[in-house]
Amino acid sequence: KLLRRTEYHGIIVSAGNGAVCFKRAEDDGEFTIPLDPGSLQPADPEAVYTLSESGKTVTGVDYVSVWTIHPAAEKIK
């Protein structure tokens, strides 16, 4: 059961020590994902991406990454 969908886009500000940190375009906050080279896929440089939550379109994308986060087993109802 999907509890929440979150989409971010922005500029990579650092990568190392097991993490990739982005400066979010939406609010200048930061978001960090694990540094997993297999999770970052080169984007189509001509593509226009539409965020499903906001409907905003994003162009000039270098990489895309999709993650599914599961709650800890004891919190599943």
Image (cartoon, rainbow, N blue to C red):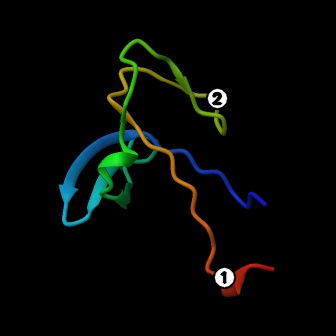
Q: Residue at x 25, y 65 (%)?
A: 18
Disc 2 target residue: 55
Q: Secondary structure at mark 2?
A: loop
Instruction: Give 40 or 59, whichever is nearer the viewer.
Output: 40
- Label 2 to label 1: alpha-carbon separation: 33 Å
Mark 2 or mark 1: which is in front? 1
Disc 1 target residue: 73
Q: Residue furthest bottom?
A: 74
Q: Position of residue 6 (x, y in %)?
A: 59, 50
Instruction: Give 23 or 74, whichever is nearer the viewer.
Output: 74
Q: Position of residue 75 (x, y in %)?
A: 70, 83
Instruction: Give 26 or 2, whichever is nearer the viewer.
Output: 2
Q: Position of residue 58 (x, y in %)?
A: 47, 25
Is the residue 30 above or below the residue 76 in the image? above
Q: Residue furthest top?
A: 46
Q: Residue at x 30, y 55 (%)?
A: 21
Q: Amino acid at mark 1?
A: Ala
Mark 2 vs 1, N-terminal side: 2
Q: Amino acid at mark 2?
A: Gly
Name which quarter of the figure residue 4 lies in: bottom right
Q: Secondary structure at mark 1?
A: helix
Residue count near mark 1 (Cα–Cα under 10 Å), binned few <14, some 14–19, many ≥20: few
Q: Which mark is residue 61?
A: none
Looking at the rendered image, the quarter that the C terminus falls into is bottom right
Q: Position of residue 32 (x, y in %)?
A: 36, 59
Instruction: Give 17 or 30, whichever is nearer the viewer.
Output: 17
Mark 2 in CB contact with mark 1 (< 8 angstroms): no
Looking at the rendered image, the quarter that the N terminus falls into is bottom right
Residue count near mark 2 (Cα–Cα under 10 Å), binned few <14, some 14–19, many ≥20: few
Is the residue 56 above or below the residue 1 in the image? above
Figure disc tally: 2
